[in-house]
Every structure is written in C-alpha cells, then in structure tokens.
Amino acid sequence: MIAARWEDGKPRCPQCGSDDVIYLEKARLFKCRTAHPKQKFSLKVGTIFEDSPLGLDKWLAGIWLIANAKNGISSYEIHRALGVTQKSAWFMLHRIRLAMQSGTLEKLSGHVGIDETYIGGKACNMHRADKARKIHGTGGGGKVAVMGLLERHGEVRTMVVANTKRKTLEKQVKANCEKGSFVYTDGLKSYNNLANDFIHGVIDHAEKYVEGHIHVNGIESFWGLLKRTIGGTYVSVEPFHLFRYLDEQAFRFNRRKVTDSERFFKVLSMVVGKRVQYQELIGRAAQ
Ligand SMILES: [Zn+2]
C-alpha cells in the first residue's frame, strides 16, 4: 500500500511534505519529525479510505473484487464476502468507484464510434415514493440518456447527458474527440453537423450494420456489457449515481487486456486525492 500510495515508496507527511517520518508500530501511525500540528498521520489520510473505520484488509479485498468483477459486484456480495454490513459495503463500493474515475483530459482520436443509449426505466417495479424520486428530472419513464465514445483499439468514454439534442451531443463529441478525427454514428439527426469538425461516417441501421470502416459495433457491445451489469448485478441504479457505474464499467473495459493484479494495483494508485462524503453519496448534496 505504501508503494502504491507514494510513487517512490517513501511515506510523506501530508502536512509539510517531508519524508523524514517514523513509523509508530503500536499506534500504526506515521509521525513527521518536523514540529507542527498534526504530526501523526495514517496511510489512509488523503485517500478514499480516510475517515473510514474499516481496516485496509477489508478495503484491499474490496478493491480486488470490484476491479475484477466483469459484471460488477453488489453490496450484498461484498457484505457476505468481507463480513461488513451491507451499508458499509455499499459505501465502500461507491468510494472505490470514485477511485476508478479516469479524470483524463486526453482526447480520443483516430476512428471513434459514437452512440447513445438509455439506462433504467423499470419504473413499474418501484414503490411509489421511489418512483416519484427516480423519475423526477430524468426524462420519459425514468430512463437516463447516456452517451459513449469508443476509440478503435483505444479507450471508451461514457457520460450521462441531459438529453440527446444536437447541442448536447455535439458538445460532448467536441470535448472528447480530436478535431479532424473519423467519427462514426448512426443516423440520429443530432449528429448532422459533425462533418463541420470531423470526418463523419453515418451508418443507417435500417439498412445495414457495417459498411467498411463505418460501424458503431464496439460501443454497442460496451452497452451490452453495461446493461448486463446494471440490470443483473445492481438491479436498480439511482440516476444521480449512474455516472459512477459508468466509470466503473469503463475502467474495467479500458483495462480488459491486463491481469487482475494489474487492475488491482491501478485502482490502488488512484485512491489518493479522492474523497467523497457520505451525504454526497446518499444524494442530498447531489440533488
Ligand atoms: Zn510534516
């Protein structure tokens, strides 16, 4: 954990940045040798583990499970596997998803397949109060519009979008794709102006699915995977949490060719500087 947390493997004081620190074995804390307030610190400070009463044994096992579960893993499974309460497991999963957010600003380029889909909408199965809450502000039937961009032989980017209007979708394409790239979409009219900034190939699904280079099959198989995860494992996802599940699925998808252990260490290197408050997670701040 020390090696993943600090790049050179040297524990550093979060207050002053000094690596002149000692380890207090009994207290299981580090202590900075420079005199200032809060000289003692734990490995968890400044990470998604901070303020969590759960030990690293639970956290690391949880990270391994979620980083490598192809179709996701429910809080119930985590609760059973790790012996933590289901509520703790749920919170843990959300914090780990936060670590899995890529945060990259690099644009996609080359050949990019673009598509949009709707997630959710099993409104008839919900309790009435739930139903009102979930449907509020998410468009027809409680469904949430999601957009995906997949670079051929590259990474996928996904985002929740307010709607599938031209202005909304175009903005995302421009924000995520290098100008002049080849972009491929279906016949949705919202994509009509992409040719102004990109080399735009359109595939009309009414006619055929693949036409030479022009297809969106890659992103469509990503949607298939995502829907199996959300429908099968997570059952019902609150719209304001949906982006976290997208990040989780994209993280695994983008690292589908590496080993379980490599994915685990990748998440571990991403736990720093990302914290989330419980109130935010349960949606009060998010709404
Ligand atoms: Zn210090």
Image: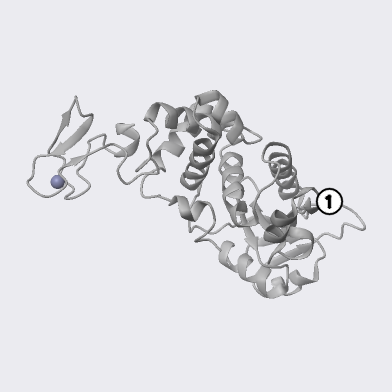
Q: In screen coordinates, is 1 left or right of 214?
A: left
- The reply to whether residue 155 is in sight is no
Q: What is the three-letter code of the residue carrying label 1? A: Val
- Tell me where residue 128 sits by quadrant: bottom right
Which residue is at a point 67% across and 60% down the rendered structure image?
A: 133
x, y percent for residue 259:
53, 28
- Tell me: is circle 1 under 8 Å from ligand 1: no
Placement of 210 over or under 138, stated as above or below? above
Q: Is residue 139 left or right of residue 242?
A: right
Q: Where's residue 127, x and y in %?
A: 74, 51
Residue 120 lies, in percent from the top left, at 74, 52
Q: Is residue 260 above or below residue 137?
A: above
Which quadrant is home to the N terminus?
top left
Q: Is residue 105 left or right of residue 194?
A: left
Q: Residue at x 17, y 30 (%)?
A: 23
Residue bearing the label numbered 1: 210
Q: Residues within 10 Å of mark 1 (few under 14, many from 20)?
A: few
Question: In the picture, which quadrant includes the C terminus?
Answer: bottom right
Q: Position of residue 67 (x, y in %)?
A: 53, 34
Q: Nearer the viewer, residue 7 or 112?
A: 7
Q: Nearer the viewer, residue 251 or 79?
A: 79
Q: Is residue 110 visible?
A: yes
Name the image colouring.
one colour
Front in this rendered view, residue 153 or 47: 47
Say which residue appears at 76% left-offset and 73% top-offset.
192
Name the residue: 46% across, 45% down.
99
